[in-house]
Amino acid sequence: MHESFSASRPAGRLTPVRATLFYAVFSALWIVASGYLLNLATEDPALLARFELAKGLAFVAFTSILLYLLLRFHASPPDSVEEAAALLPGKRRLAAIFVALALVAPLIGFGIVRLHVPQMERETFDNLGIIADLKARQIENWVTNA
């Protein structure tokens, strides 16, 4: 009975265990990579909270699409090995999907950095101006008291 069960199931068929592992790996990579990039982008807690919200919504959107695709594939399982092979994406397409998903978090991080850099530059120049004024007053006081 065990042989007929394994023979009737195509080798490439997405099982619940495989789907769960795929989801877990994708989710963990998304959370770690995007969290790391967000922490590099800003130290402002209010801005970080907004970015975390946007990151969370993007995560829900991507995982919803993945769930739909997994359920669609699982809802109408192929009748033969040939049909299963025809439903599976080719190696190039699978590689392209993987690369696209892997680039999502870095691209979001890059966008956040591009949006946040002008504010950081402005704050840095303001701080440098304040320090320059303070040093000028200190030197002025030193010269007048000497």
Image (tube, helix red, strand yellow):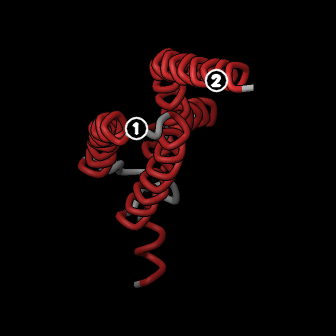
Residue 30 in percent (x, y) is at 46, 47
Residue 92 in percent (x, y) is at 63, 30
Mark 1 crowdedness (10 Å alpha carbons): few <14, some 14-19, many ≥20: few
Secondary structure beneath label 2? helix
> How many numbered marks appear?
2
Q: Residue placed at 55% from the left, 33% from the top?
A: 106
Which of 74 and 121 lies nearest the eye of the viewer?
A: 121
Query: To which residue does mark 2 refer?
Result: 141
Q: Residue placed at 53% from the left, 39% from the top?
A: 37
Residue 126 in percent (x, y) is at 51, 18
Which of 134 and 33 lies nearest the eye of the viewer?
A: 134
Looking at the image, is 63 positioned above or below residue 28?
Answer: above
The picture quadrant where one finds residue 102 is top right
Residue 44: numbered disc: 1
Looking at the image, is 102 positioned above or below residue 140?
Answer: below
Which of 123 and 3 lies nearest the eye of the viewer?
A: 123
**Residue 61 visible in the displayed image:** no
Q: Is residue 39 left or right of residue 46?
A: right
> Which residue extends farthest bottom?
1
Mark closer to the observer (2, 1): 2
**Residue 66 visible in the displayed image:** yes
Secondary structure beneath label 1? loop
The picture quadrant where one finds residue 132 is top right
First of labels 2, 1 by sequence position: 1
Which residue type does callout 1 highlight? Answer: Asp
Looking at the image, is 58 positioned above or below residue 20?
Answer: above
Which residue type does callout 2 highlight? Answer: Asn
Residue 20 in percent (x, y) is at 38, 62
